Image: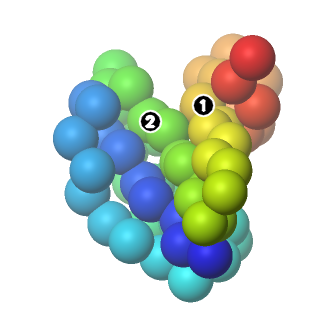
Amino acid sequence: MSWLVYVDSIPTWVCASMEQAAELAAPYAEDQRTLAIEQRTSSVSQTWLYDRPTQRWVVEE
């Protein structure tokens, strides 16, 4: 399983955990950039988007 961090839709980092991905993305949270973290496994992927008003990661629906 890998976690991909996207900054402005550009894959920027590959991480081993959601916590590491969120930590790497944190400096960009104050910018007006689009942040996303995608979890990938062999059969499924799920994406979290950074919600600035709540300052939380939310699952993309």
Q: Answer with left or right where residue 36 lies relative to residue 53.
A: left
The three-letter code of the residue at mark 1 reads: Leu
Of the numbered discs 1 and 2, the one sitting upstream in the chain is: 2
Q: Position of residue 43 (x, y in %)?
A: 66, 57
**Residue 5 sits above or below residue 41 on the image:** above
Q: Position of residue 51 (x, y in %)?
A: 65, 24
- How crowded pointer 1 is (Cα within 10 Å; few <14, some 14-19, many 20+) is rated as some
**Residue 34 sits above or below residue 7 on the image:** above
Task: Please say which color scheme the image uses.
Answer: rainbow
Q: Secondary structure at mark 2?
A: strand
Q: Which picture quadrant has residue 18?
A: bottom right
Q: Quadrant of the N terminus?
A: bottom right
Label placed on residue 9 = none
Residue at (44, 35) in percent of width and height: 35
Q: Position of residue 19 (x, y in %)?
A: 68, 71
- How crowded pointer 2 is (Cα within 10 Å; few <14, some 14-19, many 20+) is rated as many
Q: Answer with left or right where residue 22 lies relative to residue 54.
A: left
Mark 1 = which residue? Answer: 49
Q: Position of residue 39 (x, y in %)?
A: 62, 56
Q: Answer with left or right where residue 23 lies relative to residue 59.
A: left
Q: Which picture quadrant has residue 16?
A: bottom right
Q: Is residue 22 visible?
A: no
Q: Which picture quadrant has residue 27?
A: bottom left
How many numbered marks are there? 2
Label placed on residue 35 = 2
Q: Nearer the viewer, residue 40 or 50?
A: 40
Q: Quadrant of the C terminus?
A: top right
Residue at (77, 24) in percent of width and height: 54
Q: Is residue 55 visible?
A: yes
The three-letter code of the residue at mark 2 reads: Leu
Q: Answer with left or right where residue 38 lies relative to residue 13.
A: right
